[in-house]
């Protein structure tokens, strides 16, 4: 694809323009297919590609109106545990909106306030508390994302993983169906679907 070849990133510490290119590459991976866009992520570090996907997830999900105090309230992306993204994620979302809502990032939000997040990335260091954290979000309109084995089994919705050195993500379809979120079929088509085994919670 000529368009994709023109989008190949060249640097590891991107400028504002480079950040937008990576965002577009991630978006292409969601809409055109991960295989076509995979080569475009080769010049970026793993945490940068994950950050771009995390940012783009918000564009493919609808939250109930009741999860916002008003029509222009921000969409909050929370990081729980040590932040693997650093300033890269801040640069990525700076000035960006999802519809009319600005995107804001919160770190170190107390556990009892995580239900107020819209997108929640749970750091791998918290894996021993996955069950406790996700049980506390039961019934809340929170798009939960992790990157360690066991996250979906504990009830998380999406999990990053590496396949042949490329960042991919799994979707916990039963948990998504039970949630109050509306997830675009475009996103689910790209995700690796995960179905629970008999008697297993996911």
Image (cartoon, rainbow, N blue to C red):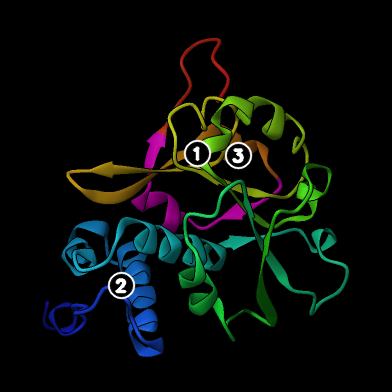
Q: Nearer the viewer, residue 109 or 62?
A: 109
Q: CA distance from mark 2 to mark 3?
A: 28 Å
**Residue at the location (27% across, 60% down)?**
33
User: Where are the magenta residues, as a range?
Assistant: 180-193
Q: CA distance from mark 1 to mark 3?
A: 24 Å
> Which residue is tagged 1?
124
* First reached walking from the N terminus: tag 1 or tag 3: 1
**Which quadrant holds the N terminus?**
bottom left
> Which residue is tagged 2?
25
The image quarter containing residue 26 is bottom left
* First reached walking from the N terminus: tag 2 or tag 1: 2
Q: Secondary structure at mark 1?
A: helix
Near mark 1 (Cα within 10 A), the count class, few <14, some 14-19 or many ≥20, is: some
Decide: is 145 above or below 23.
above
Seen in the image, is 202 located left or right of residue 189?
right
Q: Nearer the viewer, mark 1 or mark 3?
A: 1
| Residue 101 place in picture, x, y as percent | 70, 78
* First reached walking from the N terminus: tag 2 or tag 3: 2
> Which residue is tagged 3?
177
Q: Nearer the viewer, mark 2 or mark 3?
A: 2
**Residue at the location (68% across, 79% down)?**
102
């Amino acid at each position: 694809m000529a368009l994709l070849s023109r989008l190949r990133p060249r640097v590891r510490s991107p400028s504002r323009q480079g950040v937008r290119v990576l965002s577009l590459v991630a978006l292409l991976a969601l809409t055109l297919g991960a295989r076509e866009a995979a080569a475009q992520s080769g010049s970026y570090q793993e945490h940068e590609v994950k950050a771009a996907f995390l940012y783009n997830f918000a564009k493919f999900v609808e939250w109930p109106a009741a999860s916002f105090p008003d029509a222009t309230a921000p969409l909050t992306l929370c990081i729980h545990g040590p932040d693997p993204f650093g300033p890269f994620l801040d640069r990525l979302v700076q000035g960006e909106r999802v519809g009319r809502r600005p995107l804001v990032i919160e770190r170190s939000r107390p556990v009892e306030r995580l239900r107020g997040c819209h997108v929640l990335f749970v750091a791998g260091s918290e894996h021993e508390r996955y069950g406790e954290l996700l049980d506390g979000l039961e019934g809340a309109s929170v798009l939960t994302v992790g990157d360690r084995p066991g996250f979906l089994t504990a009830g998380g919705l999406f999990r990053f993983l590496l396949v042949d050195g490329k960042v991919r993500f799994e979707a916990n379809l039963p948990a998504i169906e039970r949630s109050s979120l509306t997830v675009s079929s475009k996103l689910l088509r790209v995700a690796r679907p995960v179905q629970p085994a008999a008697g297993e919670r996911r």
